[in-house]
Amino acid sequence: MQTPRAESSADLHSVLVQTLGLAIAEGTLAPHSILRLDELEARHGVSRSVVREATRVLSAMGMLESRRRLGTVVRPEECWNLYDPQVIRWRLASSRRVDQLRALNELRGAIEPQAARLAAERATWEAGSDLVAQAARLWAAGQRGNQDEFLRLDIEFHAAVLRASGNPMFSQLHNLVAEVLTGRTEHGLMPHLPQHEALQLHVDVASAIQRGEMDAAHAAMRRIVEQSTEEIGDIWSSSHQQSAGKDDAGAAPGPGAAPQPGTAAAP
């Protein structure tokens, strides 16, 4: 029998970064708690060099800090690089993902409508035409119910609008928007079939940009972000109500509860 190949140092490092990052984002590793390198070695079965590299990466993200005579300390959320794509993923994987998505959508609401307005002012006719074509492909994917293709095209569409704004700082935020769109899909906070209004709004944004209608482009993009926030809240509330209903159905009747049909009341 062939001996299994040992995991590489890079693999072990990646797994440890992921494990610690998720624990910090979730709060399992609480702010200001102290991590002992020797304890991390023993608990995760890795070498000191792997632990040091993992903590170095997390320190660069603002999640950890090395303090003299104290050790490696978990930093509070306000110190993290909240724009780092990996930090965004960890926050979205936590139990507070709806709050994270809401905060990210509030940021989108401040940026993307203005980017659409600038795109309507600055984009070339060719760029506007490309956006119209992208919106048409997005519509078709949504109608077919192909969620993977829809997500890919949706990410491309929003990135194209940010680029068309002509503002390089807006353009570089495309990764943030991609993480929001990916996160809500991966965590079941996206309708299986996109709403007709959402599909139409993407067409409206592209058409307004192509025609140079700045206010219309701004309004349509603002509504896209608003609708996304509404959908996230509705789906989350619905799933929790269903879970609560199942819990209630499985619970024993409380004192004084009426007997269920087909059962006899206690004497």
Image (cartoon, rainbow, N blue to C red):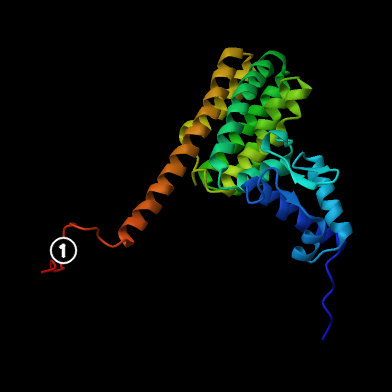
**Could you say which is closer to the camera, residue 230 or residue 133?**
230
* Closest to the observer, 71 or 259: 71
Image coordinates of residue 219 in percent, x first then y, are: 54, 19
Q: Secondary structure at mark 1?
A: loop
Is residue 156 visible in the rendered image? The answer is no
Q: Please report the residue visible at 68 percent of the width from the left and 13 percent of the height from the top.
A: 121
175, above or below 124, in the image: below
Q: Residue furthest right?
A: 49
Which corner quadrant holds the N terminus?
bottom right
User: Which residue is depicted at the point 66% across and 28% down?
Assistant: 131
Task: From the viewer's perspective, tell me whether residue 196 is left or right of residue 62.
Answer: left
Residue 48 on image: x %, y %: 87, 59
Furthest toward the left, the residue is 267
11 relative to 100, above or below: below
Residue 92 screen position, x and y as percent: 61, 44
Instruction: Specify whether residue 178 is in view.
Output: yes
Q: Relative to 161, say whether 213 is above or below.
A: above
Percent across and percent down for residue 98 are 54, 40
> Count the marks: how many?
1
Q: Is residue 16 toward the left or the right of residue 219 in the image?
A: right
Assign the C terminus to one quadrant of the image.
Answer: bottom left
Q: Nearer the viewer, residue 263 or 114?
A: 263
**Which amino acid type is marked by label 1?**
Pro
Which residue is farthest bottom?
Answer: 1
Near-viewer residue (195 or 65): 65
- The residue lying at 86 percent from left, 43 percent from top is 68
Residue 257 sits in which quadrant?
bottom left
**Could you classify mark 1 by the number of other residues whose Cα lies within 10 Å: few (under 14), some (14-19), or many (20 or more)?**
few
> In this figure, which residue is indicated by the disc labeled 1?
261
